Amino acid sequence: MSFSLNYSKCEIIVGLFLLNLFGYVFSQCSGSAQTLTAGQSIQYFTSPDYNNGAGTYSSNLDCQWIIDSNDASYKVILYLKNYNVACSGDNINIFDGNTVSGTALKSNICGSGASDKIVTSTGQYMTLRFTSDAVNQSVGFEAAYFSATDLSGTGCTSEQTMTPTTSPQYVTSPSFPSLYDVSSNCRWVLTVPAGRVQVEIIYSDIETSANCAFDSLEIYDGDYVCENTKIAAVCSRYPSGITGTYLSNGTSFLLKFKSDGSVSFTGYLIKFIQVEEAVSSNPLTSSDENGGNFDQLMLGIGIGCACGATATLILVFIVSFFKSKCRSPKIASPRVKTVEPMNGGPHMRTPSVNGSVDSSDSISHSRNGFIRRPLTTSRRSSMIDGKSHGFLP
């Protein structure tokens, strides 16, 4: 006796999809945990039948997910993005390690919300267990996760220069993914010999404050600090923290992170790569085009001679304006190492006994060419308990 099975490709694909779907639910909710491999980009998983927050999970579930950072030197960060779990007998428990017998990191989570549920493992693994009873089912949860380690390098002891390539590299806040250090002052210069730099903020969890007065991550377009080149100031909690991609106008970005003496959070993860410059697809090569361009050149020279004086004055004004902006007393020299030294600077003025500055301090030039000016009553830095409170008009 023999028989044959004749199925179309469409039927086979649908069958495999259904098998995979039911196998997915079975593997994580019927006594066998599902293993998820974390990377340095944020991924998501949900409870069964979550359906973007519009579904309902089944009764009598016992589901487990093991999250593996895939590297013994990396930890796992997990965030309950949304959850709505009946408290009558359903709950979420998160454990350190790859079994439910590990140390509990969060216990008996139920109800609804998404506030302050960031959890970090102490090692390579984390386990989440979700259980439901026979009554009162609800929506379930959605969780975000990724792997993390401290990639701050030497940027918090002295300015660190890094060279992006076409392969992704990463930089983080100090002590990431643990709470960042208080009183931090960190700088990284990302510079390429040719092309441009692309920076992506993957994750940010920084103390929130008005105008980022307490803790902040700042991105500057260039390799120095100038208020006109600041393109981002980040100071908000995850998941409301700023994320996004930035492309430099030149060959460099400068990243600056500072924190005050109290309150810290998990910090940030940034990816950076080198982006090649696009090559023009219409180069001028023919002799006719070059001949035509010669006539245009002569016309341009004639017009330029007539308007040269005016254009020169406008150019001088523009250059002077931007130089004054980038070298104003609020920012001082545009070079970071001179403007804002990591551990104080060599050109410090000593106040007299009554707190005023010696008026005999005269204008002089330092070796690096920057002008040192005396402090006067019309432009001075207000100092209280050793802390600068900005320049007074």
Image (cartoon, rainbow, N blue to C red):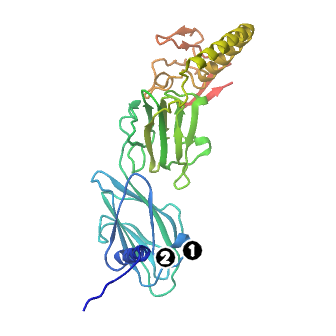
Q: Is residue 41 left or right of residue 357?
A: left
**Residue at 30% from the left image edge and 57% from the top image edge:** 124
Of residue 344 and residue 220, the one placed in the foreground of this image is: 220
**Residue at 46% from the left image edge and 64% from the top image edge:** 143
> Total number of numbered labels?
2
Task: From this view, report whether residue 288 is shown above or below residue 201.
Answer: above
Categorize mark 1 by other alpha carbons within 10 Å: few (<14), some (14-19), many (20+): few
Q: Which mark, residue 49?
A: 2
Residue at which label 1 appears: 54
**Residue at 31% from the left image edge and 76% from the top image edge:** 32
Q: Measure the C-alpha gap from mark 2 to mark 1.
A: 9 Å
Task: From this view, report whether residue 261 is shown above or below residue 223.
Answer: below
Of residue 92 and residue 198, the one placed in the foreground of this image is: 198
**Residue at 36% from the left image edge and 45% from the top image edge:** 150
Task: From this view, report whether residue 151 is shown above or below residue 89.
Answer: above
Q: First in sequence: mark 2 or mark 1?
A: 2
Q: Is residue 376 visible?
A: no
Q: Is residue 115 left or right of residue 317?
A: left
- The amino acid type of the residue labelled 1 equals Ala
- The amino acid type of the residue labelled 2 equals Asp
On the image, the x and y values in percent for residue 78 come to 42, 60
Q: Which mark, residue 156?
A: none
The image quadrant that residue 99 belongs to is: bottom left
Of residue 242 and residue 163, the one placed in the foreground of this image is: 163
Q: Is residue 314 visible?
A: yes
On the image, the x and y values in percent for residue 105 come to 38, 64
